[in-house]
Image (cartoon, rainbow, N blue to C red):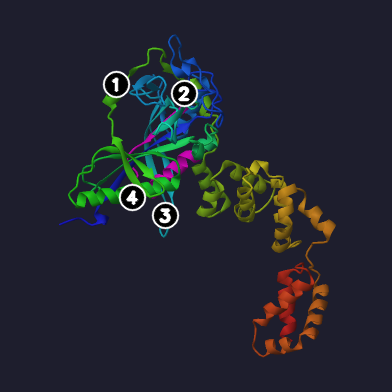
């Protein structure tokens, strides 16, 4: 009897390739600048020309160790580089310098917060098998068809060849496409907090290979593993996993074999396609690189780098909830980008209430930042000035409506909200006698509405509030205005 989908379990692991943000490549001084003319950032070492020798970039080692420490990995006192035979046209040496059996770090973990639609958010601990350093390959540009030659062709850009990568290999602890996407997102977030990578997936600074199989329940043996290469967005990771889980289950249910292979995700068709049979480690014929000596990370150096680590996203989320009484959702949004989190913290330090600061930052201000492709550090509107605006609202000097009216100007040019309000006379009218006189005039102007209210149509109170706001250009204190209106309308 065939099993139902609910009886199957997916087993997912990710290999995340993080481009380390050094100015020069891993074994040479060639530039890592992105977007320049093809084949302008290469040299004899990148091309592996005879007589050249690679030299490890010290900044690469620092970034790799810091990344490993942030992922709770154990740093190896001694590690080494190996040659991995890779006969691809975008690898100029026909081998890749990587780390095989003695990586820089092993056995770590991170906590991943998983928010699935229609379900409670939960935190899952995901094991990390290893982190190792390696060089990137170049890039193939498929140029299409040459009409004169009557054939298709591809171009090779070696600018990316030799760029430093940290490959982070998770344990097979992920069970859904959503978990896989959230894990990759947290890895990216951590790398950006550390400042070791920009994590720009559109430029290839972070890419993921997904290894996925299915089995009949958590106690069954693992199924045949399939790899999906070069995922460059979190939504693609989730969709590819979900498609592949369904494809493999259907294959097993119908008696078809699932073969070990490498597949690609077709974003347009929303499916995975076979690329090639999957190589095993023996196919790569690893051996120690004879041109690079062993790597030693002393305890003193390791601890010095550990002390330079910032507060990481997970720790910030916990602190925001426990110390600032924010919701888990607010904490998650605020900590997604370090610049937003830092801006928020500076606003709170300047005296604003945390919840109000969160509402303004994650709402109108984040919308402006995203629409204008800015970073929070580039905003002319300083945290101190936002705190000033929030305190003006809390004290009753201005309404939220007035604040929203002056916010676009503040976001573009900065400045003191209180100064603008005072100069333009935008402060709220909160004098009881002034508001009382205005309400009296309104009741004279709208006698039928007053009679209808007293006859039971209580919703007309909103009508009078609207009229009062209209004649005061929105400057009447809403709370006080409602109190005076209600008292007078009730007679």
Q: Circle 2: is it few (<14), some (14-19), or many (20+) Cα within 10 Å?
A: many
Along the viewing direction, whichever of 84 and 18 lies nearer the viewer: 84
Q: Please state the horizontal and vertical placement of residue 56, each as a whole percent of the image.
A: 48, 18
Q: Quadrant of the N terminus?
A: bottom left
Question: Which residue is the site of mark 2?
Answer: 162
Residue extending farthest left: 1
Question: Do the numbered discs 2 and 1 sit on residues whose CB atoms are within 8 Å?
Answer: no
Q: Secondary structure at mark 3?
A: loop
Name the front one of labels 4 and 3. 4
Name the front one of labels 3 and 1. 1
Residue 90 vertical placement versus 192 (above, below): above
Q: Please state the horizontal and vertical placement of residue 3, each as a whole percent of the image.
A: 20, 55
Q: Circle 4: is it few (<14), some (14-19), or many (20+) Cα within 10 Å?
A: some
Say whether disc 3 or disc 1 marks the residue closer to the N-terminus.
Answer: 3
Along the viewing direction, whichever of 118 and 353 lies nearer the viewer: 118
User: Image point 51% across, 36% down: which residue?
Assistant: 203
Where, by quadrant of the figure, is residue 479 drawn? bottom right
Is residue 188 found inside the magenta-colored segment of the image?
yes
Question: Which residue is the site of mark 3?
Answer: 116
User: Image point 73% across, 51% down: which residue?
Assistant: 410
Say whether disc 1 or disc 4 marks the residue closer to the N-terminus.
Answer: 4
Q: CA–CA distance between discs 3 and 1?
A: 42 Å
Q: Secondary structure at mark 1?
A: loop
Say whether disc 4 or disc 2 marks the residue closer to the N-terminus.
Answer: 2
Q: Secondary structure at mark 2?
A: loop
Question: Which residue is the site of mark 1?
Answer: 285
Q: Circle 3: is it few (<14), some (14-19), or many (20+) Cα within 10 Å?
A: few
């Amino acid at each position: 009897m065939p099993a139902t989908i609910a009886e199957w379990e997916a087993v997912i692991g990710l290999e995340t390739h993080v481009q380390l943000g050094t100015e020069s490549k891993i074994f040479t001084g060639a530039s890592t600048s992105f977007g320049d003319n093809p084949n302008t950032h290469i040299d004899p070492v990148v091309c592996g020309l005879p007589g050249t020798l690679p030299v490890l970039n010290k900044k690469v080692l620092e970034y790799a160790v810091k990344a490993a420490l942030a992922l709770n990995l154990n740093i190896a006192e001694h590690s080494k580089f190996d040659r991995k035979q890779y006969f691809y046209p975008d690898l100029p040496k026909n081998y890749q310098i990587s780390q095989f059996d003695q990586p820089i770090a092993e056995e770590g973990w991170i906590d991943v917060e998983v928010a699935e639609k229609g379900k409670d958010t939960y935190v899952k601990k995901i094991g990390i098998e290893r982190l190792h350093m390696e060089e990137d390959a170049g890039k193939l540009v498929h140029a299409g068809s040459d009409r004169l030659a009557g054939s298709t062709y591809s171009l090779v850009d070696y600018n990316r060849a030799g760029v430093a990568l940290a490959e982070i290999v998770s344990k097979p602890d992920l069970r859904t496409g959503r978990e896989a996407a959230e894990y990759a997102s947290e890895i990216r977030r951590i790398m950006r907090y550390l400042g070791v990578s920009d994590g720009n997936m559109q430029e290839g600074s972070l890419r993921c290979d997904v290894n996925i199989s299915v089995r009949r329940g958590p106690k069954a043996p693992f199924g045949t593993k399939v790899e999906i290469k070069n995922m460059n967005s979190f939504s693609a990771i989730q969709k590819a996993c979900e498609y592949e889980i369904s494809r493999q289950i259907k294959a097993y249910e119908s008696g078809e074999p699932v073969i070990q292979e490498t597949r690609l995700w077709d974003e347009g068709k929303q499916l995975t396609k076979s690329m090639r049979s999957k190589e095993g480690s023996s196919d790569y014929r690893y051996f120690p690189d004879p041109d690079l000596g062993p790597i030693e990370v002393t305890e003193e150096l390791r601890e010095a780098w550990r002390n330079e680590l910032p507060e990481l996203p997970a720790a910030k989320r916990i602190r925001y909830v426990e110390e600032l009484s924010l919701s888990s959702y607010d904490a998650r949004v605020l900590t997604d980008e370090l610049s937003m989190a830092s801006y928020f913290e500076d606003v709170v330090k300047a005296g604003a209430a945390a919840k109000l600061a969160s509402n303004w930052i994650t709402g109108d201000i984040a919308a402006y930042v995203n629409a204008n492709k800015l970073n929070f550090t580039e905003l002319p509107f300083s945290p101190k000035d936002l705190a000033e605006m929030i305190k003006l609202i809390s004290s009753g000097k201005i309404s939220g409506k007035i604040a929203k009216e002056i916010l676009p100007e503040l976001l573009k040019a900065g400045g003191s909200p209180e100064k603008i309000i005072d100069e333009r006379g935008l402060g709220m009218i909160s004098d009881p006698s002034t508001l009382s006189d205005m309400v009296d005039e309104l009741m004279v102007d709208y006698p039928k509405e007053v009679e209808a209210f007293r006859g039971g149509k209580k919703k007309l109170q909103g009508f009078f509030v609207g009229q009062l706001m209209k004649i005061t250009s929105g400057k009447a204190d809403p709370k006080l205005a409602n109190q005076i209106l209600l008292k007078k309308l009730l007679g």
